[in-house]
Amino acid sequence: MSSDVTLGSTTKSEWIKFHTVRSTVMGVIITFVLTIGLGVLITVAVRGHWTSMATGERLTFDPVSASLDGILFAQFAVGVIGTLFITSEYSSGSIRTTLVAVPNRLKLMAGKLIVLAASMLVVTEIVCFITFLIGQAIFSGVVPTASLSNGTVLRTVIFAGVYLTLLSILGFSLGLILRQSAACISVFTSLLLILPIIAFLLPQSWQHAFSKFEPSELGRAMTSVTGTSGDFSAWGALALLVTYVVVVLGVGTTMLKRRDA
Amino acid sequence: MIKVEHLSKRYKRTLAVDDLDFEVRPGVVTGFLGPNGSGKSTTMRIILGLDHPTKGRATVKGKRYEELRDPMHEVGALLDAKAIHPGRTARNHLRALAASNRITVARVDEVLEFAGIASVADKRVGDFSLGMSQRLGIAGALLGDPEVLLFDEPVNGLDPEGIRWIREFFRSLANEGRTVFVSSHLMSEIAVSADQIIVIGRGKFITQGSIDTLTATAKGTVFVRAANHPLLLASLRSKGGVISEVNDEGLSVSELTSDQIGQIAFDAGIALFELTPQRASLEEVFMDLTADAVEYGSSGVRHEQ
């Protein structure tokens, strides 16, 4: 049975919607500024203090994750991009126009997901590679540098982009469930910022066992070349974060399908 | 054709739509009339597959909305003109809609032109007046050149020129054999554009028919001017008359014919100066019809606790 509304046409429609609003454009600019800007600040600071750093610190220094530290701030920008992609439809009421044009809600969700995942992956990978290269150039001559010819380094930089993309999908999934921009951004921020504070209040012996499951810690594990003992491996962290996102997205999709629009 | 069969919709504790059952035929403009909050929008949302019915079903051309193969070619709808992302331009909004149903960009320009908003196509929708948004909503509904059209309160916010334009537009759509279903909470507005009217109140079906049949069934009033208003008033009341209005000019009486009133005045020895039967106005017909619905409504509530 052929229909005029295919996954392709839905995706094309969502792509037009995605890039024709200011919030997406601003979100992408902020992602660039935060990741690259903070990357430059941090690497310049490390270079300046390198000679005064303790030997132990210097031995475990990870030039890859140090240059990519800006993603800890950029993760909020990408989360907001993902969230607004769906919640703005609810706040403006345009979700109804959208669903009258594309009544198959699974198809609509899939179209949005493809647009968000593909465009955020492109954006965040470009950002992470630029940040990494600038960071290594700043380190060069003083601080030990990493090279993309090393497979682990390459994977780590790629994973930094993958981490940000997954977080934007997490923001989107929360948006499907909560429908309200403000509520959604609060929950998203809490997951990344408040959860670590709660972990900090736990008895010392539990802290690490709990905190390594936090999304932000998974991100750290994904973007660290050296890795800390007891942490998840980069691949393990990726698998767990993907699982989180799939679960939240699954709940969100079920709710999109069941609820009145 | 739109068919609504024993449709009910409950939101938590309120029954927004209560066993509605009607058909909307092609080739005529069908008005969907009811006071605010009577369930018109809910019914339209269910027809469009946005809300899930609690009971019963609504179909367009024999199918539930979700089952339509080419939704925008089959149905065009304008629900809430302001329900568009305010940051997007009118053209981009329509381009995105068109792309989802594989409608060409040329058609986007066509509907922009038709709706009279081509000159503001590249302005952000957030800056649009309600009237311009209505025109944009109409342009969106027409994108797929659909056979069935639904408009929820389309006249809101339009200027007199826009209102005339939209009435002629509904008429021409119906003349082309399309199904046109237009809601309103104002009888006077719908009377000029609709051939058929479906009236609902508190989610329940009240009546259906042409304007003429509806006004014919409604009760009229009789205007009376007499020598002794207080005495006449008492006499009319004792014979079952209902006085709807009293002022210096005279009395408006319902439930009695002018013949009966003349006889009562004569028996009471009151001189009549004026006795004029008045046909119910459209708004009065509507008020009359929906006042009944309020009574049904409250008994319905008791029924369900």
Image (cartoon, rainbow, N blue to C red):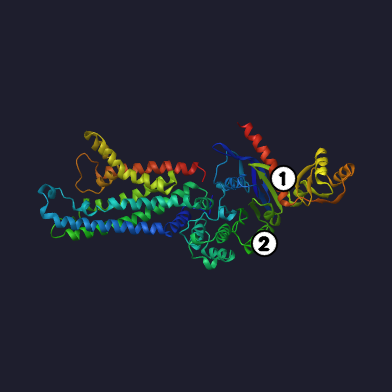
- On the image, numbered disc 1 is attached to which residue? B288
- At label 2, counting other C-alpha atoms closer than 10 Å, the crowd grade (few under 14, some 14-19, many 20 or more) is few
Q: Which residue is painted at 68% across and 54% down in the image?
A: B190
Q: Which residue is painted at 42% across and 47% down in the image?
A: A175
* Residue B159 x %, y %: 61, 62
* Residue A198 x %, y %: 29, 38
Return the disc, 1 or 2, that comes first in the chain's sequence. 2
Q: Is residue B12 left or right of residue A141?
A: right
Q: Is residue A217 left or right of residue B62?
A: left
Q: Chain of mark 1?
A: B
- At label 1, counting other C-alpha atoms closer than 10 Å, the crowd grade (few under 14, some 14-19, many 20 or more) is some
Which kind of residue does numbered mark 2 sit on? Answer: Glu
* Residue A114 appears in the picture as rendered: yes
Q: Quick check: B173 above or below A231?
A: below
Q: Is residue B34 left or right of residue A56?
A: right
* Residue A217 x %, y %: 27, 44
- On the image, numbered disc 2 is attached to which residue? B168
* Residue B207 appears in the picture as rendered: no
Q: Chain of mark 2?
A: B
Which kind of residue does numbered mark 1 sit on? Answer: Asp
